[in-house]
């Protein structure tokens, strides 16, 4: 009997030690280790982008090391004002593998709506193609040129008004951009693009960021695959106002200074020396 009692006591002592050990472990382990984050079903071409964007003070775990995204109120500006305001802001593209590509906006063009003969909405014409121009400020308008390339616009205040993004300065994810440009640019398979060639034009930046017609009519303030962040603090850039590109047949509107770019930035698509000298 004494031997049996000793064995029972030994087992009880061992069980108590195990309970104490389990309790200590539960205090050390973070909540995420004890209760795994529930996975959500994936659907659609841009699904599986990660956990919901409502955690943390900046609304998403993906902004922990970057400024919070710009909201709808930022885009609610007249076209020319918004085109200038875009300069220096950071456009972010999040790919389906969670890679984030960041680029600083360095060149834009404003299109002012029905009265603008160079705008796709001239005369108030609204079609299935240009519907994004008539939607709330911050709506993306993506259209096709030459039947194969895309251009990215953002609607501004006023029906039919928008801003074309003409050039970006790549900041993060350059190798991915290089690979995308090489893959998507016709006749350029295998070419090693230089940094200043990646986003120095409307269709080039769409290739570098894998932007296609599926982005048309998305809301830049809420979309999970593309958004805009406020640019890092620094000296105010010198902005050049020049004529827009490729609209020489649009009469007086071809002469209006509605293209804006950061002077001296090597990633700008086209420099206007005459405009720079006049504004010096």
Image (cartoon, helix red, strand yellow):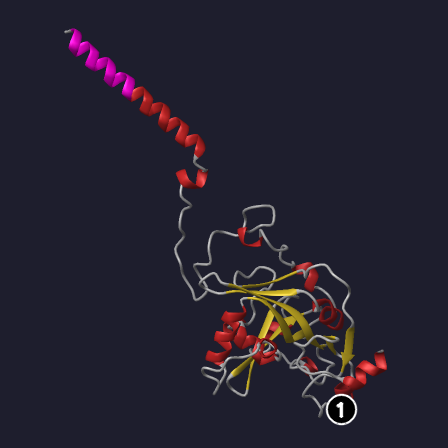
**In the drawing, does residue 197 fall left or right of residue 247?**
left
**In the drawing, does residue 229 fall left or right of residue 35?**
right
**Residue that sits furthest to the top in the current view:** 2
Q: What's the magenta bit mostly, secondary-structure-wise?
A: helix
- Residue 164 or 44: which is nearer the viewer? 164
**Residue that sits furthest to the left in the current view:** 1
- Residue 137 or 20: which is nearer the viewer? 20
- Residue 71 coordinates in the image, percent (x, y): 65, 58
**15 versus 140 height, above or below:** above
User: How would you rate the neighbour count of disc 1 (Cα within 10 Å): few for under 14, some for 14-19, many for 20 or more?
Assistant: few
- Residue 129 coordinates in the image, percent (x, y): 56, 79
Quadrant position of residue 232? bottom right
Quarter holding the N terminus is top left
- Residue 200 coordinates in the image, percent (x, y): 62, 79
Q: Secondary structure at mark 1?
A: helix
Asked if the stretch drawn in magenta spans residue 79, the answer is no
**In the drawing, does residue 209 fall left or right of residue 75?**
left
Residue at (50% x, 84% y) in the render: 148
Quarter holding the C terminus is bottom right
- Residue 68 or 123: which is nearer the viewer? 68
**Residue that sits furthest to the bottom in the current view:** 249
Quadrant position of residue 160? bottom right
Looking at the image, how many numbered discs can be counted on the residues?
Answer: 1
Which residues lie in the magenta part? Answer: 2-14
Q: Is residue 127 visible?
A: no
Residue at (77% x, 77% y) in the render: 240
Q: Is residue 63 visible?
A: yes
The residue to which callout 1 is attached is: 251
Residue at (63% x, 73% y) in the render: 168
Asked if the stretch drawn in magenta spans residue 5, the answer is yes
**120 versus 42 height, above or below:** below
């Amino acid at each position: 009997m004494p031997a049996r009692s000793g064995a029972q006591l030994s087992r009880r002592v061992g069980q108590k030690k195990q309970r104490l050990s389990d309790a200590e472990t539960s205090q050390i382990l973070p909540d995420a280790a004890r209760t795994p984050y529930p996975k959500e079903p994936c659907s659609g071409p841009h699904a599986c982008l990660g956990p919901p964007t409502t955690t943390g003070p900046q609304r998403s775990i993906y902004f922990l090391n970057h400024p919070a995204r710009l909201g709808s109120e930022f885009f609610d500006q007249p076209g020319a004002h918004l085109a200038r305001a875009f300069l220096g802001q950071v456009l972010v593209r999040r790919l389906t593998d969670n890679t984030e590509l960041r680029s600083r906006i360095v060149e834009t063009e404003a299109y002012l709506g029905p009265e603008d003969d160079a705008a796709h909405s001239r005369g108030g014409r609204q079609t299935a193609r240009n519907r994004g121009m008539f939607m709330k400020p911050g709506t993306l308008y993506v259209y096709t040129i030459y039947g194969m390339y895309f251009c990215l616009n953002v609607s501004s205040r006023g029906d039919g008004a928008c801003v074309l993004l003409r050039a970006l300065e790549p900041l993060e994810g350059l190798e991915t951009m290089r690979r995308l440009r090489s893959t998507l640019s016709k006749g350029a398979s295998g070419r090693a693009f230089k940094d200043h060639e990646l986003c120095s034009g409307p269709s080039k930046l769409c290739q570098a960021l894998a932007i296609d017609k599926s982005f048309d009519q998305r809301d830049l303030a809420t979309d999970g695959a593309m958004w805009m962040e406020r640019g890092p603090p620094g000296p105010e850039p010198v902005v050049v106002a020049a004529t827009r590109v490729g609209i020489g047949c649009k009469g007086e509107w071809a002469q209006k200074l509605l293209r804006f770019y950061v002077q001296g930035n090597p990633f700008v698509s086209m420099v206007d020396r005459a405009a720079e000298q006049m504004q010096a």
